[in-house]
Image (cartoon, rainbow, N blue to C red):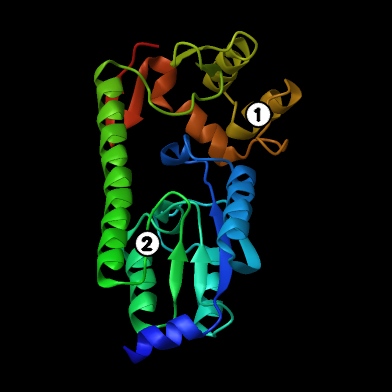
Amino acid sequence: MSTMQNTISSPQKFFLYARKSTDVEDKQVLSIEAQITELRAYAKIEGLNIVEEFIEKQSAKILGRPIFGKMLARIEKGEANGILAWHPDRLARNSVDGGQLIFLLDSGGLAALKFPTFWCENTSQGKFMLNIAFGQSKYYVDSLAENTKRGLRQKVRRGEYPALAPIGYLNDPRTKTIIVDKKRASLIRKAFELYAKNGSCLEDVATFLAQSGIHSKNGKRLHRDRISFILSNPFYYGHFRYGGEIHEGKH
């Protein structure tokens, strides 16, 4: 009873937290700008005292979000005793982060969590519902990962390489297949022919590709290790490596 009275009597200071990542599970989530706009409007209606806003562009399915960690550390120091977010899945998609938030509610470090899209009170029922929401978020991520892996395995069975195409090929976003890069394919073929000649070495191939305008992503000359990888890549004779095995490809 005394804890409840302290919570009610003490002024609540809220940290606003908005997060969105480039991961698949966040495709349908509001943009960070939209979250902030909605949260500010909600705070005004509810009379919440927002002392600072935290913005993070990172997945919550794994541990180690730096901004989220700093926010909790400052809450533990007493700089705020509430968090406002769009939905519980913005705060946690893994069991550790979710458990940490519930522990802060239990220990009094947090007085309240507020969401425009989810009811949550600092009561036994509210924490129970919050725990379910965190569990649903984790289940969604886990299920999505399983379905993604299953889809990749099916692509491999069809002879389709489920990754970025090597130099000389392109990923076609329309058909989601790999096609020949008409501009570079002949150059890669010539690189193989050059290496097959007597007296040629990896450095000769690197020089040829550099002179032909083929460089690394940062615009530098391809390293000898990269050249060796290209020349030993089974993709160029119709197969590909995946999951530690060689598979026959359709490309």
219 to 171, vertically: above or below: below
Q: Which residue sits at x=40%, y=57%?
A: 62
Is 217 on the left-hand or right-hand side of 133? right
11 to 151, vertically: above or below: below
Q: Nearer the viewer, residue 86 or 169?
A: 86
Q: CA distance from mark 2 to mark 1?
A: 66 Å
Q: Quadrant of residue 159?
A: top left
215 to 85, vertically: above or below: above
Q: Could you say which disc has been placed on residue 34 in the image?
A: none
Mark 2 crowdedness (10 Å alpha carbons): few <14, some 14-19, many ≥20: some
Residue picked out by circle 2: 120
Q: Nearer the viewer, residue 158 or 211?
A: 158
Residue picked out by circle 1: 204
Q: Nearer the viewer, residue 11 or 102?
A: 11
Quadrant of the snapshot with the N terminus? bottom left
Amino acid type shown at disc 2: Cys
Q: Quadrant of residue 155?
A: top left
Q: Quadrant of residue 244?
A: top left
Q: Which residue sits at x=45%, y=59%?
A: 91
Amino acid type shown at disc 1: Asp
Q: Which residue sits at x=47%, y=35%?
A: 27
Q: In what element is the residue under mark 2?
A: loop
**Percent from the top left, x then y, of residue 181?**
58, 12
Is 56 on the left-hand or right-hand side of 117? right
